[in-house]
Amino acid sequence: MKLSRQEQMIVDAFHRAAPGNLTNRELNTICFRYGARLWDLSRKGFRFETLAVDAAAGLYTYRLLSDPADGQGPRGESTASTPPTQLLASTPPAAPALRQPIIGQQRLC
């Protein structure tokens, strides 16, 4: 698969990163529109995970979960047949969403 120069630079940076994680600040030094390049890469079969480190300060961490070129995760583990729940085993499960009726309040979208 053909990757643009910026996409290739981002993929290479994920492979060089020790735990396979990059912050949005590190990605911004590679490409100002890194969000668009991550979206393009996800359309090409790459899988990423986003974690808020400090949302108030605008700091997020991105992790490369799978690379379709080699069928490997960032640390060499095979992701070809691993269920997504096992890939994210290191992160705590999300709390179930509580649905509460909105009575007498305006809902903000």
Image: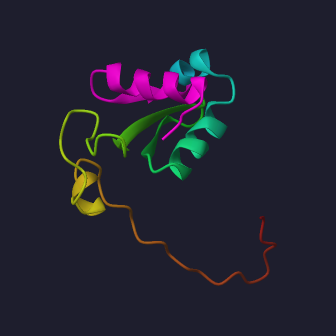
Q: Residue at x 27, y 21 (%)?
A: 18
| Front residue (pair 91, 19) | 19
Q: Nearer the viewer, residue 80 or 19?
A: 80
Name the residue furthest front: 1
- Residue 78 lies, in percent from the top left, at 19, 47
Quarter of the view holding residue 38: top right
Above or below, 58 against 28 in this view is below
Query: Which residue does the image show at 29% across and 40% down from the upper left?
Result: 70
Screen quadrant of the C terminus: bottom right
Front residue of 5 and 38: 5
Magenta residue span: 1-24
Q: In the image, is 12 to the left or to the right of 27?
A: left
Q: As displayed, is residue 29 above or below residue 71?
A: above
**Left-right relation of 46 to 81:** right
- Residue 72 is situated, as x and y percent measured from the top left of the image, at 25, 41
Does residue 21 show up magenta in the picture? yes
| Residue 28, image x, y percentages | 61, 21
Residue 32: quarter of image:
top right
Residue 91 % position (x, y)? 29, 49
Q: In this rendering, would 3 be left or right of 65? A: right
Tell me, yes or no, whether the highlighted magenta stretch contains residue 88. no
- Residue at the spot x=45%, y=51% of the render? 45
